[in-house]
Amino acid sequence: MPPRNPTAVPRCPVFRARLSFAFVTAAVATSCAAKKPIAPPGDQKPRTGLEKRHHVLHMDPVRFVADPTGKVRVEEVDVGNEFAKAEKLYAAKEYRAALKIYDAIANETTNVANKLRAIYNAGLCFEGLKRCHDAVTRYADVTRLAPKSPESRDADVRRVVCLKTIKRWRDAADAIETVLKRSDFEAADRIELAMWRGVAFIHLRDLDEATRILRRALDKFDEHAKYERLDKAVAAETLFWLGEIYYRRFFAVLLDDPKTELNTSMLDKARALYQARDEYLRAIERGDVYWSAAAAHRIATLYEKLREHVLAIPIPRELNESQAELYVSELARHKIIEPLIGKATHAHEQVLKLAERMSFDSEHVRKSRAAIERLKRLVLKSPVAPPVKP
């Protein structure tokens, strides 16, 4: 199994009390600063337990033998391990060459265990080639040939990972439901699989079912964490996705809906914002740097979008041009709307401070950096006085 992502940051203590957003993000960075890693550029999304499980399966030694007619067969012997060649090719990222050897073994060998391992490793090669559809087929073959084998357990996990990658969410949800019926997964794996299933239902737009699944997964995590060491990134990610549910509900509320009174829509939108923010703050409190940055960026985005959506409300038709300009100016100066730029900027700044202290980079960090520049330009162009800093 390859080592854990070298860019992953050390875990931080869980924050039990409800803290302010700025203090929590600062505390996450400070508590980890003593072991600050040197991080290479690029995304540093933590790979949790199941996602790391894509090691090449070793096989019994084999040898290719050609008969007088030129037909090649594979013999199970104690020397001449062609599988070792495939391993070296795979390690060198020469996936096509490795795939040919694994396919030859799978087609010719009479050893069932070797056949399963060859098919599984062929799936890994397809993943390396970014051909996840083909990888899914190979992993499904492993499970079909030996549904209760250790190889099929690993194949089931990789099949789910691939289905997630290619966004076949219904297939992923169904596959996870089937996999969870197995009895050979530990509690930590089952919790993570359940979390993945909840994410699938978010993408399937069944937010109520996603909420139920994710809440239950989080409860299981906290229950087992009392007497078992679990990866806090799983809890942080679960809470992030719970925040995403309300994030989607926020965007689903339209302020220009003629069927709903504006006051009602505003209350619904504000309620969704605060619910999303609270889940994101809980994700930050778990102390995982990647998901803390992601959650903080989302909070900032919510503040930006609320201001944007309010200012986009259609101007009353009875107003003339000068009255309309005054209307927009007064709306932007409203005691609820005016501070939103400052709140968004402050949240984005927390992301950058966290990234700087941890020598950390991700898509959320880059987006926050760009957002700060955009908000600065917005303040300069706006006739409204600069918002107060929260």
Image (cartoon, rainbow, N blue to C red):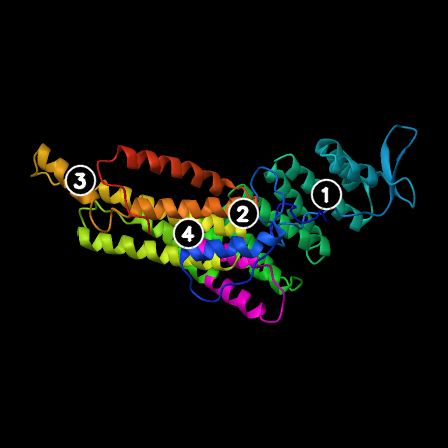
Could one spot residue 68 in this view of the protein? yes
Foreground tag (2 vs 1): 2
Instruction: Please state the horizontal and vertical placement of residue 126, each as a whole percent of the image.
Output: 66, 37
Mark pair 4, 1: CA separation: 35 Å
**Amino acid on which the number 2 mark rests in the picture:** Arg
Mark pair 3, 4: CA separation: 32 Å
**Amino acid on which the number 1 mark rests in the picture:** Asn
Query: Which residue is under mark 1?
Result: 121
Task: Count residues near mark 2 (Cα–Cα under 10 Å), then give few for <14, some for 14-19, many for 20+.
Answer: some
Q: Nearer the viewer, residue 87 or 41?
A: 41
Sequence-wise, which precedes: disc 3 or disc 4? Answer: 4
Instruction: Please state the horizontal and vertical placement of residue 106, each as a whole percent of the image.
Output: 77, 41
Helix, strand or loop under label 3: helix
Instruction: Please state the horizontal and vertical placement of residue 140, each as a whole percent of the image.
Output: 64, 47
Mark on residue 37?
none
Query: Which residue is under mark 3?
Result: 329
- Determine the main secondary structure of the stretch shown in magenta: helix
What residue span does the magenta drawing correspond to?
Answer: 215-242
Query: Which residue is under mark 4?
Result: 244
Helix, strand or loop under label 2: helix
Foreground tag (3 vs 4): 3
Residue located at (55% from left, 65% from top): 221
Residue 316's image quarter?
Answer: top left
Sequence-wise, which precedes: disc 2 or disc 3? Answer: 3
